[in-house]
C-alpha cells in the first residue's frame, strides 16, 4: 500500500474542521467582544461626563445670577462635579464666565469643561495611553421681569420695610429683598398694603395678608438672591468746580460739574444735561421747581438727598452713555440715608442707585408719570407710593425673575 493510500482517509475526513475553525477564530471573537465592551464603557463614561458638565454649569450659573465672584462660581461648579461622581485627581475642570467659545459669550453665561482619564483594557495591547473623555456645557440665566425695588442687604431684618397706613403700588414690576433674615427679610407693617406683580425675598416675608400679587400665585420666600445690576458702574469724574447759587422766586440754570458744597435749590431751577458730582447735600426746598433732562447726580460719601414737601421735581436720566438710566448714584463708601420726603410732586425717570445706603420715602410720594426704580442697601417706605409708571423701553432696570437653562 502506498503512502498516498494510507493518508487518503485523513485528507478526506472533515470531522475536525469545525474545531479547527473555532480554535483559529476564537481570538478574533474574544478580541471583538472585548473591543465592543470597552467601546461601550468609553461611550458610557463620555455620556456620564457630559451629564457632570451640565450639572456643574447649571450650578455655576445659579451662583452667577446672584452676582457671585468667579471663585464662588468655580467652587460651586467643582463641588457639583465631584458630587456627581467626577474625580479631581489627575483630571481637569475649566470654568469660564463669559464662555470663551460658542454662541453665548455673555457675562450671564457659565461654561464648564471637564476631562477624565478613562483606562484602557483590551486596547491597552496596542496603546497604553488612557482615553481622555471630555464634557462641555454652557448654562445661561435669562431675565424675565423687572424689579421696581431691590434691597441688596444680605442679612438685615426688614431690608424692605413698608410702614404707615399708605398703599405701595408697583405697576408692572416686582419688589425683592436679598436679605436671608428668616422671618422679616421684607416687612409690611400694620394697615399698609403692597401691590406688585411678584414679591420675592431671600428670607421670610412678614404680614403677607396685606400683600397682593398679580404675576405670582403668592409672595415667594427663600427665593434666590438677585445680582446688583450696576455693580460694574464706576464713579464719575468731578469735572469743573461750580457753585449752586439759587434764590426763591428766581429762575436759575445750572451746568454739569463738581459741586463741593452740594446744592441748595430754591425757586425755579433747570439742570442742563450731564453729570453732577455733589460733595455736599442736595437740598430741594419747599415750593421749589426743579427740572433736568438727561442728568445723573452722584452723591459723594457723606452727601445726602433731602427732598422736602411741596416741591415739584421733573428729572430724567441719560438715555445713552456710561450712566444710561442712572438718575442718582450713591458713593459705595457712603452709609448716608437718602430721603425723599413729603408730598412732593415727583416725575422721576431713572434708577436711584444707592448700593450701601438706605433710601427712605416719607409722606406721600406720587411718582406720577415717571419710571422710578430703586436699588439700595435697604428701602423704607411710609405713606403712599406709586412706582414703575410710564417706563421707556430702552431704560436699563433691575431684573427680578431669572431662568437658568443649559444652552450648549
Image: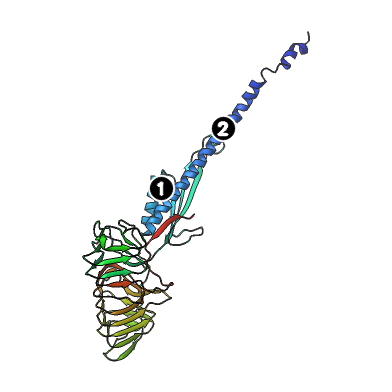
Q: Return the residue found at the far top.
A: 1
Q: Is residue 5 above or below residue 192?
A: above
User: Which sits in the foreground, 195 or 355?
Assistant: 195
User: Which sits in the foreground, 253 or 135?
Assistant: 253
- On the image, numbered disc 2 is attached to which residue? 33
> Dot 2: what SS?
helix
Span of residues in magenta: 30-34
Q: How far, Cα to Cα, is label 1 from label 2?
A: 32 Å
User: Which sits in the foreground, 132 or 329?
Assistant: 329
Of callouts 1 and 2, which one flags the residue occurring earlier in the amino acid sequence?
Answer: 2
> Dot 1: what SS?
helix
The reply to whether the magenta stretch includes residue 147 is: no
Residue 383 shows up from this direction: yes
Q: Where's the N terminus, which quadrant?
A: top right
- Label the magenta part by its dominant secondary structure: helix
- On the image, numbered disc 1 is attached to which residue? 81
From the top left corner, tell me how far across and down residue 35 is, in percent: 56, 35
Amino acid at each position: 500500500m502506498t503512502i498516498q493510500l494510507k493518508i487518503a482517509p485523513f485528507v478526506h475526513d472533515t470531522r475536525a474542521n469545525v474545531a479547527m475553525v473555532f480554535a483559529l477564530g476564537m481570538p478574533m471573537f474574544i478580541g471583538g467582544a472585548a473591543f465592543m465592551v470597552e467601546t461601550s464603557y468609553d461611550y458610557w463614561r463620555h455620556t456620564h461626563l457630559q451629564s457632570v458638565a451640565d450639572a456643574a454649569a447649571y450650578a455655576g450659573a445659579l451662583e452667577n445670577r446672584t452676582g457671585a465672584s468667579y471663585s464662588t462660581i468655580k467652587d460651586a461648579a467643582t463641588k457639583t462635579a465631584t458630587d456627581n461622581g467626577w474625580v479631581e485627581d489627575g483630571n481637569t475642570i475649566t470654568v469660564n464666565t463669559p464662555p470663551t467659545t460658542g454662541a453665548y459669550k455673555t457675562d450671564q453665561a457659565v461654561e464648564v469643561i471637564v476631562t477624565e482619564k478613562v483606562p484602557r483594557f483590551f486596547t491597552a495591547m496596542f496603546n497604553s495611553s488612557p482615553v481622555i473623555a471630555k464634557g462641555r456645557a454652557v448654562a445661561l440665566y435669562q431675565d424675565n421681569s423687572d424689579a421696581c425695588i431691590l434691597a441688596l442687604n444680605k442679612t438685615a431684618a426688614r431690608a424692605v420695610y413698608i410702614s404707615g397706613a399708605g398703599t405701595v403700588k408697583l405697576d408692572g414690576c416686582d419688589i425683592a429683598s436679598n436679605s436671608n433674615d428668616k422671618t422679616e427679610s421684607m416687612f409690611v407693617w400694620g394697615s399698609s398694603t403692597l401691590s406688585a406683580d411678584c414679591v420675592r425675598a431671600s428670607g421670610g416675608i412678614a404680614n403677607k395678608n396685606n400683600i397682593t400679587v398679580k404675576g405670582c400665585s403668592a409672595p415667594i420666600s427663600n427665593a434666590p438672591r438677585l445680582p446688583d445690576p450696576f455693580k460694574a458702574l464706576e464713579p464719575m469724574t468731578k469735572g469743573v468746580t461750580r457753585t449752586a447759587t439759587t434764590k426763591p422766586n428766581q429762575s436759575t440754570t445750572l451746568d454739569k460739574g463738581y459741586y463741593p458744597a452740594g446744592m441748595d435749590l430754591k425757586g425755579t431751577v433747570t439742570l442742563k444735561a450731564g453729570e453732577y458730582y455733589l460733595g455736599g447735600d442736595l437740598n430741594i426746598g419747599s415750593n421749589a421747581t426743579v427740572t433736568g433732562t438727561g442728568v445723573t447726580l452722584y452723591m459723594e460719601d457723606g452727601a445726602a438727598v433731602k427732598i422736602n414737601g411741596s416741591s415739584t421735581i421733573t428729572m430724567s436720566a441719560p438715555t445713552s452713555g456710561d450712566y444710561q438710566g442712572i438718575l442718582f448714584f450713591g458713593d459705595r463708601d457712603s452709609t448716608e440715608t437718602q430721603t425723599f420726603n413729603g408730598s412732593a410732586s415727583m416725575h422721576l425717570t431713572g434708577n436711584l442707585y444707592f448700593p450701601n445706603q438706605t433710601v427712605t420715602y416719607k409722606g406721600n410720594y406720587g411718582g406720577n408719570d415717571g419710571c422710578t426704580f430703586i436699588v439700595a442697601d435697604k428701602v423704607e417706605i411710609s405713606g403712599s407710593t406709586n412706582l414703575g409708571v410710564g417706563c421707556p423701553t430702552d431704560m436699563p432696570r433691575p431684573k427680578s425673575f431669572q431662568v437658568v437653562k443649559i444652552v450648549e
